[in-house]
């Protein structure tokens, strides 16, 4: 609650500090706080200083701290290595789109893939946003910030996980090379996607990243994304909906999130709504109209996980007003509950 983002302020202030009882092991608590502050800092940094190159650099900084292996696929290499949707979304920007992958941990431990939407600024593409809608789109890389913050929690506390972090990074910019409404994109999964709306770009970059994550047969894939306005209409800014294609972890995660005062709310992958994404010329569209927008986004993403255990968190990444423990601005949701679940061995039950 004492967090402040003062990078651009001339005058710094003194802020309250957490003083823990001597009997408490503060190392875990400090690591959780540092991870949340990392995510908030990434979101709060303006897009001019947190473009694709800078976001990759932050991921590499974390990777160096924990001796992760890092692999980046960017620019034309995305086409050569079959990430066509990531390339299409980011090809109009002055900094190349990219997929950044971090791996950490003992290969004998269960594999957890964390996938983050890293749209460093979202103009809406040729379906351009309004002035009000664009104002805080520096936060549209909030999914990547969540994935990196969660990875930091796991690695700092040395949880028994084989971690694979995939950050799908691009700027959804407008230029002569921008992708268009009506275009049909191929995908790493082999599915074709008709572009109904260029402002539904996050699910496109996630689709290719989720396909890559599934190829290594993880015990669980979790993706984080500032994905839909529909989720905010349904549940507001501070209660992220989550979707899961397995029943076993849903109640435990919902309960633990409440206990951690970091609530999330389960939502249905209601298969009949997949009809909203039907296209006459491609395997599906990337947007489904005004009904059930958070659900249809989840259904779209599910097509790319190849049946692997998977969860999708549609986070806002932003506190529109200060509340206890949540300063105004960039915010990290859901991770404290997920961390508690993971620490209690939840990953072993996620495939049931």
Image: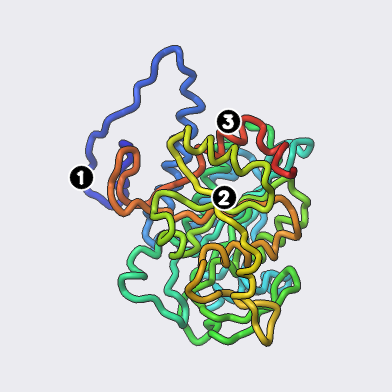
- Under circle 1, the secondary element is loop
**CA neighbours of label 2 inside 10 A, class few (<14), some (14 to 19), many (20+):** many
- Under circle 2, the secondary element is helix
Mark 2 → mark 3, Cα distance in angstroms: 19 Å
Q: Are marks 1 and 3 in contact (CB under 8 Å)?
A: no
Q: Most extreme residue toward the left, as rendered?
A: 11
Mark 1 → mark 3, Cα distance in angstroms: 34 Å
- Reading the image, the residue beneath label 3 is 157
Q: Residue at x 68, y 69 (%)?
A: 83
- Reading the image, the residue beneath label 1 is 11
**Mark 2 or mark 1, earlier in chain:** 1
* Residue 78 rendering spot, x and y as whole percentages: 67, 70
Q: Residue at x 77, y 57 (%)?
A: 215
**Mark 2 or mark 3, earlier in chain:** 2
Disc number for residue 226: none
- Reading the image, the residue beneath label 2 is 60
Q: Nearer the viewer, mark 2 or mark 3?
A: 3
**Is residue 350 among what the camera can see?**
yes
* Residue 69 rendering spot, x and y as whole percentages: 68, 47
Q: Residue at x 41, y 13 (%)?
A: 22
* Residue 1 rendering spot, x and y as whole percentages: 33, 37
Mark 2 → mark 1, Cα distance in angstroms: 30 Å
Horizontal placement of 236 versus 81: left or right?
left
Q: Residue at x 67, y 46 (%)?
A: 247
- Under circle 3, the secondary element is loop
Residue 181 appears in which quarter of the rendering?
A: bottom right
12 or 258, which lies in front? Answer: 258
């Amino acid at each position: 609650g004492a967090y402040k983002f003062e990078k651009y302020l001339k005058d710094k202030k003194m802020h309250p500090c957490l003083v823990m009882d001597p009997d408490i092991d503060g190392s875990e608590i400090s690591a959780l706080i540092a991870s949340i502050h990392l995510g908030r800092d990434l979101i709060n940094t303006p897009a001019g200083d947190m473009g694709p190159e800078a976001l990759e650099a932050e991921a590499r900084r974390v990777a160096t701290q924990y001796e992760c292996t890092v692999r980046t696929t960017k620019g034309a290499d995305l086409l050569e290595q079959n990430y066509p949707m990531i390339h299409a979304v980011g090809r109009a920007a002055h900094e190349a789109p990219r997929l950044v992958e971090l791996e950490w941990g003992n290969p004998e431990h269960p594999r957890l893939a964390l996938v983050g939407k890293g749209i460093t600024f979202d103009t809406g593409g040729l379906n351009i946003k309004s002035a009000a809608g664009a104002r805080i789109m520096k936060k549209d890389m909030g999914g990547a910030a969540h994935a990196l913050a969660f990875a930091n929690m796991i690695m700092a506390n040395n949880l028994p996980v084989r971690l694979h972090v995939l950050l799908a990074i691009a700027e959804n910019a407008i230029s002569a090379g921008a992708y268009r409404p009506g275009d049909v994109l191929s995908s790493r999964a082999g599915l074709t996607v008709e572009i109904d709306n260029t402002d539904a770009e996050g699910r496109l970059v996630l689709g290719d990243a989720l396909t890559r994550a599934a190829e290594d047969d993880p015990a669980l894939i979790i993706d984080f994304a500032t994905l839909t306005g529909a989720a905010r209409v349904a549940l507001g800014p501070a209660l992220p909906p989550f979707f899961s294609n397995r029943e076993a972890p849903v109640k435990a995660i919902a309960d633990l999130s409440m206990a951690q005062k970091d609530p999330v709310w389960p939502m249905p992958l209601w298969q009949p709504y997949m009809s909203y994404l039907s296209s006459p010329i491609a395997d599906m569209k990337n947007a489904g109209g005004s009904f059930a927008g958070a659900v249809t986004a989840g259904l779209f993403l599910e097509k790319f996980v190849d049946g692997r255990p998977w969860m999708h968190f549609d986070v806002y990444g932003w506190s529109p007003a200060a509340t206890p423990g949540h300063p105004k601005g960039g915010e990290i949701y859901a991770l404290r509950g997920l961390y508690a679940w993971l620490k209690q061995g939840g990953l072993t039950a996620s495939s049931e």
